Amino acid sequence: MRTGKWQKMMSIAVAGLMAVGLAACGGSGSSSTAQTTPVADSGASAGESASADTGTAAASGEKVITAAFSTAWDTMMPLNTTSNYTRMICDQIYDRLTQSKADGTIEGRLAESWSTNEDSTKVTFQLHQNAVWSDGEPLTAEDVVFSYQMYSDPEVEAKSRYHLEYIAGVDDSGAELSEDSIEVEADDAYTVTFTLKTPMFVDTFLQDIDTVYIIPKHIFEGKTAAEINAPDLWANPVGSGPFIYDSEINGERMEFVKNPNYFLGEPKIDRLVLRVTDSASMLAGLINGDLDMIGYDSILIDDWDLANEQENLVTKSVPTTSYSTLIFNTAKPYMTQNVRQALSMAINRQVLVDALLQGQGEAIVTPISSISPYYNEDVEVWYDPELAKTMLEEEGFPFDQMLVFYISSGNSVTERAAALIVQDLQKVGVKVQIEQVDFATLMSNMLDGKHDLGIIGSGGTLDPSESREMIHPDSSVNFCQLTDTELTDIIDEGNSKLTFEERKPYFDEYQVKIKERSPMAYLYTKNILTAYNKRVSGVEVENFNSLNWSSWNWDIE
């Protein structure tokens, strides 16, 4: 869908919708928690107006829920983000074909049902026929086709393009091989068929497109790529989601009103307010009633005991696949495999879990944690600083080299984790300089290879192939600068098998191999420590890390 294509007029005037499905720095979409989605937390307080929210709601009789985020959205263009905070916002405005639950199951969203052909190379979706855009236009299969063409157009800015990687007609970055080559076709007004590159386990594909949103064709058709990339067309979005964009104070708050025509059911609340709130202020806001729930974050671990004492709150510690990982720049000549193993081996992960998370997490050495059915219990977490130092010496590591360590600013847990990691590396003679930058700069600098080390978070998923995007050479989030496909070849072999029993040996091998190659040092998963007011009902907070609010089911007394 190159620039010329945007200017063509289509013969069928129908509209379509596509959905996005998250993770957390992944991340991890899907059957789990969100796709491999790099995320970072930073806080900006927007505190004073909360009481006004409550007072206005009481006066008007509106049902209002105010949810807290620690980090503001980075764009209103849903295809051009890797931020799970932004995706949670987009998910209120737009739809996606399916969405995942914390237990690994997948449920329909815009798709009422789906099926695969005999050799699992085609997936056909039947769409809800009563879905409409917020301007009243019908949403049809043509919208879905148009959306995937938009995502795959290399002239359009789309950081989320890599989620299209399994679809025929695109390269491994998700970019179309030629104009409109992506093989997504409308069979009729409410049926869409996706052709896959190879036979594969269908849940892996569904989880990968779990963060692809459907865009209204009738709004964007005929626009140039430059117009698509500019913010103007996205400023007052037309969507098909449960809520309709109402207003915002950039970087502080965004408000939505319910979509009375939402095809999965009219939301029970009238207004949804998302407020950017410093993590240190979240519990206070929940206690005094200025906030009703935490939308996509955790209460600070130091506040957890106090949160559990509050009679007006429901508190939950939810194990997740969300993980933090220490990136190694494999392109640096001194960052050999043995050096990377040694650096990983020097880190005391259990201290990180105990000191940073007070035990509310799990030390890991691969992206697949113990809550996954694909977990290989024979791949043990290592910690051996004496052996690490010996390995560095034998490898001829330049101990006078100062390693540049990028971290995202504004996240106290990341800052403390980085400090502990630096201490561990100093114990084996490695010099490290921490550079704190905003998240966008961190990602840009690491993609440009300016780092030696860097911390990234991902939502992870229960699907074992979730980490593919971060280790494939052509991926837009290949922060490790890997240039070979040894690791992703194993994933692809596993994905070509159509049953769990056939897939498990390949992902057992993958966990062994990724520990051996050590393109990054996976550190820990962390539980979500979340809370909401007892007046709120219909929430399933265990699904939040899967970027699944199902907010149309929420209610408040």
Image (cartoon, rainbow, N blue to C red):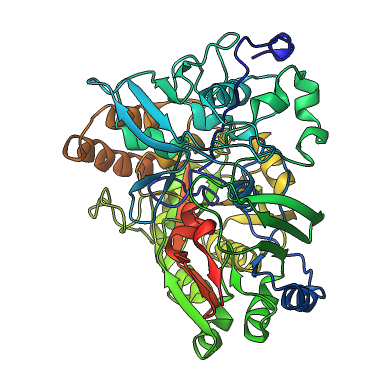
Observer-nearest residue: 6 or 46? Answer: 6
Classify residue 3 by image quadrant.
top right
Percent coordinates x, y for residue 60 in the rendering: 75, 72
- In the rendered image, residue 49, in percent from the top left (x then y), is placed at 81, 73
- Seen at 82% across and 75% down, the residue is 48
Above-or-below relation of 471 to 359: above
Residue at the spot x=59%, y=69% of the render? 294
The answer to whether residue 26 is visible is yes
Q: Quadrant of residue 145?
A: top right
- Which residue shows up at 59% across the image and 71% down it? 293
Q: Using residue 196 as the reference point, say whether residue 499 is left or right of it.
A: left
Residue 400 visible in the displayed image: no
Residue at screen point 80% across, 76% down: 52
Quarter placement of the C terminus: bottom right
**Image x and y of residue 64, in percent:** 66, 69
Asked if 426 appears above or below 287 in the picture, the reply is above
168 shown above or below 413: above
Lateral position of residue 348 relative to residue 144, left or right: left
Residue 44 location, x and y as percent? 76, 65
Q: In which quarter of the image is residue 464?
A: top left
